[in-house]
Image: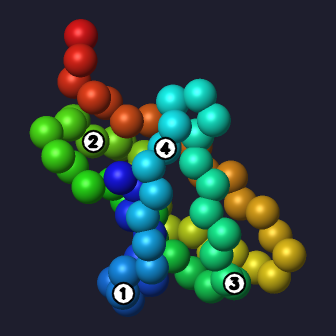
Amino acid sequence: PIVITTSGGDFIGSVTADPVSGYSVALSPGTYVVDIRRQGIGGSGDLPKTITIRHGETVRLDISIDTGIR
């Protein structure tokens, strides 16, 4: 799962990315940290990532996750 927390570490929510459509999360304006729960997968050099959402703004965050499958 992709995990969203506040910059202070409070849990906001999580979402599972779909391989075809990706993921989408509606967030109120603020600063958030996006990361993944590493459950036997290699992780991502892209994460954790701090993002700032402003009123009326859409933010796109593309991430690459190494599943370790070769």
Q: Secondary structure at mark 3?
A: loop
The location of residue 14, given as percent across then percent down, is: 42, 64
Q: Earlier in the sequence, mark 1 or mark 2?
A: 1
Distance of label 3 from label 1 (alpha carbons): 15 Å
Q: Give the quarter of the image for residue 6.
A: bottom left
Q: Residue furthest top?
A: 70
Report the residue at 37% width, 81% height from top.
11
The location of residue 25, given as percent across then percent down, is: 61, 63
Query: Label 3: which residue?
Result: 29
Q: Which of the two marks, 3 or 4, is nearer to us in this view?
A: 4
Report the residue at 26% width, 55% height from top.
37
Q: Amino acid at mark 1?
A: Asp
The answer to whether mark 3 and mark 4 are in CB contact below 8 A is no
Q: Residues within 10 Å of mark 1 (few under 14, many from 20)?
A: few
Q: Secondary structure at mark 4?
A: loop
Distance of label 3 from label 4 (alpha carbons): 22 Å
Report the residue at 20% width, 37% height from top.
41
Q: Residues within 10 Å of mark 4 (few under 14, many from 20)?
A: few
The location of residue 16, given as percent across then percent down, is: 44, 49
Q: Earlier in the sequence, mark 3 or mark 4?
A: 4
Q: Judge whether residue 48 can be spotted in this image.
A: no
The answer to whether mark 4 and mark 2 are in CB contact below 8 A is no
Q: Amino acid at mark 4?
A: Ala
Distance of label 1 from label 4 (alpha carbons): 21 Å
Q: Earlier in the sequence, mark 4 or mark 2?
A: 4
The location of residue 1, given as percent across then percent down, is: 35, 52
Query: Label 2: which residue?
Result: 43
Q: Which mark is residue 10?
A: 1
Report the residue at 58% width, 40% height from top.
22
Q: Earlier in the sequence, mark 3 or mark 1?
A: 1
Q: Which mark is residue 17?
A: 4
Q: Earlier in the sequence, mark 1 or mark 4?
A: 1
